[in-house]
Amino acid sequence: MHRYRQPSNEDDFEDFCLLLLRRHWVSPQVDRFGHRGERQHGVDLIDKSGMTPLRVAQCKHHSPWKTLPPAELRAEVAKAKGFPKTIGLYVVLTSAKKSAETDLEVVDINEAHKQAGLFTVELLTWDGIERLLDDYPEVAEKLVTIPHAEWRSLALEHQTTLTKVSAEVHDLQEVMAVDRRANDFDDRLEEAKRLVDEGQPRAARLILERLRERLWHDLTPSQRHRLQARTAGTHIAEANYERAGTLLVEAGSLVPEDDAAKAQAALGWELLGDGRKAILLVRFWTEAPLTHEPRRFSQGPPRATLNSNVSLHSSVPLLPSTLSSNSHWPSEP
């Protein structure tokens, strides 16, 4: 069995009811009564033809799987009692489904109105409206027919779509937030590097420590590695080689497959005074032969080299640029 697609909002439903009652009452003079914001006494549509008894109507748009509550019906009927003209027939048209409780309420109201000499109340729920549409195809053609079972399915699909869109918007907001944090992270690293290059390692370290406090748990391993390496650079600038070495070894473990991280880890061991381990690590990664056994120096960090005579610390791009100069390192005795 097929049904008719309902108008999607109050205004469209009222337009539809206007067409339907003009045909059903055979009166082209059925029109809207007043406008929104005016006191309408529970009346949306009125037959202005002058026929008696006076016929008026109220339009109540509801979801098709809901019912019209008896209390809502009573409230509209009570308003209509204050209408400035004597009403003969009061029709309530609704897109809601039929309800035994509301039907009984109509009976009770009409019994009371008959004794009091008041108007008759008629309730047209959507199933009753559909039967009228079967008789009035010229009105029915204004609507698109769909199977009854599909109507509920379409409504549920619509709700599912809204939920999905809402989730996608939330995900997009999260991505934008991550992008903003990433940009802020990069800016702070560059600022710290600039401060070290300008001879202000303590100010740079303060920026990096605050960055760690705020973002560490949200950072990727690669970002954590960069942050550790930059922090190590601030300690090297103040000749705090032991702390710098510890940070560089930790940084290397965060991204163990990264070439720069490997070089930084080797440099970290060199700064910690274990030059042999640094050289062995480099030899393992590069399969390059050792040129000499590491030597101990009376001050500063040892400097292990490969047969290419390239210093380990010269291959660490994330350290401040000033640290790549041999003049920055303590000289051999």
Image (spheres, grey):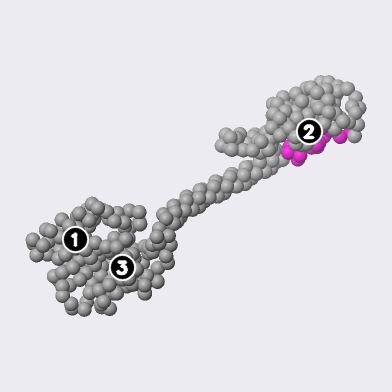
Q: What residue does disc 2 label?
A: 263
Which residues are the magenta region?
Answer: 309-327
Q: Dot 2: few (<14), some (14–19), or many (≥20) neighbours within 10 Å? A: many
Q: Which residue occupies 55% across, 50% down?
A: 172
The amino acid on which the numbered mark 3 sits, given as a three-letter code, is Leu
211, 24: nearer the viewer = 24
Q: Which residue occupies 14% across, 65% down?
A: 119
* 1 or 3: tag closer to the N-terminus: 1
Q: Position of residue 100 (x, y in %)?
A: 24, 53
Q: Quadrant of the C terminus?
A: top right
Mark pair 1, 3: CA separation: 23 Å
Rendered image: mark on residue 132: 3
* 1 or 2: tag closer to the N-terminus: 1
The amino acid on which the numbered mark 2 sits, given as a three-letter code, is Ala
- Provide the secondary structure element on which disc 2 rests: helix
Q: Nearer the viewer, mark 3 or mark 2?
A: 3
275, 204: nearer the viewer = 275
The amino acid on which the numbered mark 1 sits, given as a three-letter code, is Val
- Provide the secondary structure element on which disc 1 rests: helix
Rendered image: mark on residue 77: 1
Q: Position of residue 95 (x, y in %)?
A: 32, 60
Mark pair 3, 2: CA separation: 84 Å
Residue 56 shows up from this direction: yes
Q: Which residue occupies 90% across, 24% down?
A: 292
Number of numbered labels in the structure image: 3
Figure check: 171 above or below 261: below
Mark pair 1, 2: CA separation: 85 Å
Q: Position of residue 274 (x, y in %)?
A: 79, 22
Q: Nearer the viewer, mark 1 or mark 3?
A: 3
Image quadrant in which you'd find residue 243: top right
